[in-house]
């Protein structure tokens, strides 16, 4: 059985968020097959684990959004990697450790969100798909994790399912943040996809700004 927490951690920590996932979107001309290395999020976030890392980043952005209403974003202190705190256990951001099924379900939602965002530029042809599967093999994933990732790659993107899986505003924020981590946002299609996703998730524009800032503070884009 695939370990969703480990899979997310491997995707985020291997640079796959900007290399592998970005490659899903751009195919042969993307960072997947060029010298551009993938982006990695901060060390402290990665040490928390894949699901916890996304939760911590979304939690930090949510805190800034909640405390900074009516305050110019630049007037708020940045949340550095060193200052990053885990999302509270049992909160809407992070199911308790005892809820294994809940954590696995959240992890799968976030992986699907990353894949959907990475494919925002369009469909992949057979040659591009083969190159991506070769890249998956090079990531050094466990067989079960690799099988799950390949299976998810073969699924049609279902934005409705991703949006409907947001059982709370906090999970909606995590879905958006994971999607933002998956791409460089350097094409009109990617920008449009994120704008559409934020709108469908009913995220306030100010919160979207904080989520974007949180990603940028981690990966330096």
Image: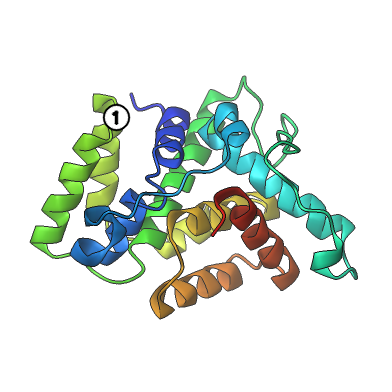
Left or right of residue 107, residue 18 in this image: left
Report crowding for label 1: few under 14, some 14 to 19, many 20 or more residues within 10 A (C-alpha).
some
Residue found at the far front of this picture: 35
- Estimate the x, y position of residue 197 in percent, counting from the top left: 52, 68
Element type where label 1 sits in the image: loop
- Residue 162 % position (x, y): 47, 57
Q: Quadrant of residue 139?
A: top left
Q: How many marks?
A: 1
Q: Residue 19: x percent and y percent?
A: 34, 51
- Give the residue displayed 70% in from the left and 72% down from the top: 205
At 74% from the left edge and 35% from the top edge, which residue is drawn?
85
Residue in view at x 72 percent, y 38 percent: 84
- Residue annotated with mark 1: 141
Q: Does residue 137 sit above or below 37 in this rendering?
A: above
Residue 189 horizontal side relative to residue 26, left or right: right
Q: Residue 141 is drawn in which quadrant?
A: top left
Q: Quadrant of the N terminus?
A: top left
Question: What is the basis of the colouring in this image?
Answer: rainbow
User: In this rendering, is residue 59 above or below 159?
Assistant: above
Which quarter of the image is occupied by the C terminus? bottom right
Give whichever of 3, 128 is nearer the camera: 128
Rendering quarter of residue 127: bottom left
Relative to 68, 111 lies left or right: left
- Residue 36, compared with residue 145, is above or below; it is below
User: In x, y percent, where is residue 92?
Assistant: 70, 42
Out of 214 and 124, give the one closest to the viewer. 214
Q: Classify 15 as above or below 2.
A: below
Q: Residue furthest top?
A: 98
Q: Residue at x 59, y 37 (%)?
A: 53
């Amino acid at each position: 059985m695939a370990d969703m927490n480990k899979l997310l951690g491997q995707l985020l920590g291997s640079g796959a968020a900007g290399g592998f996932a970005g490659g899903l979107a751009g195919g042969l001309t993307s960072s997947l097959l060029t010298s551009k290395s993938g982006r990695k999020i901060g060390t402290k976030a990665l040490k928390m684990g894949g699901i916890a890392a996304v939760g911590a980043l979304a939690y930090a952005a949510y805190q800034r959004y909640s405390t900074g209403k009516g305050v110019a974003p630049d007037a708020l202190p940045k949340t550095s990697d060193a200052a990053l705190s885990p999302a509270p256990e049992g909160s809407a951001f992070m199911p308790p450790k005892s809820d294994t099924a809940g954590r696995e379900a959240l992890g799968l939602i976030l992986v699907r969100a990353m894949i959907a965002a990475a494919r925002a530029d369009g469909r992949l042809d057979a040659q591009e798909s083969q190159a991506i599967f070769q890249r998956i093999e090079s990531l050094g994933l466990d067989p079960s994790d690799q099988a799950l990732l390949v299976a998810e790659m073969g699924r049609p993107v279902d934005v409705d399912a991703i949006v409907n899986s947001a059982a709370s505003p906090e999970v909606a924020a995590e879905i958006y943040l994971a999607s933002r981590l998956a791409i460089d946002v350097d094409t009109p299609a990617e920008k449009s996809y994120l704008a559409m996703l934020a709108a469908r998730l009913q995220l306030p524009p100010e919160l979207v700004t904080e989520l974007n800032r949180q990603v940028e503070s981690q990966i330096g884009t």
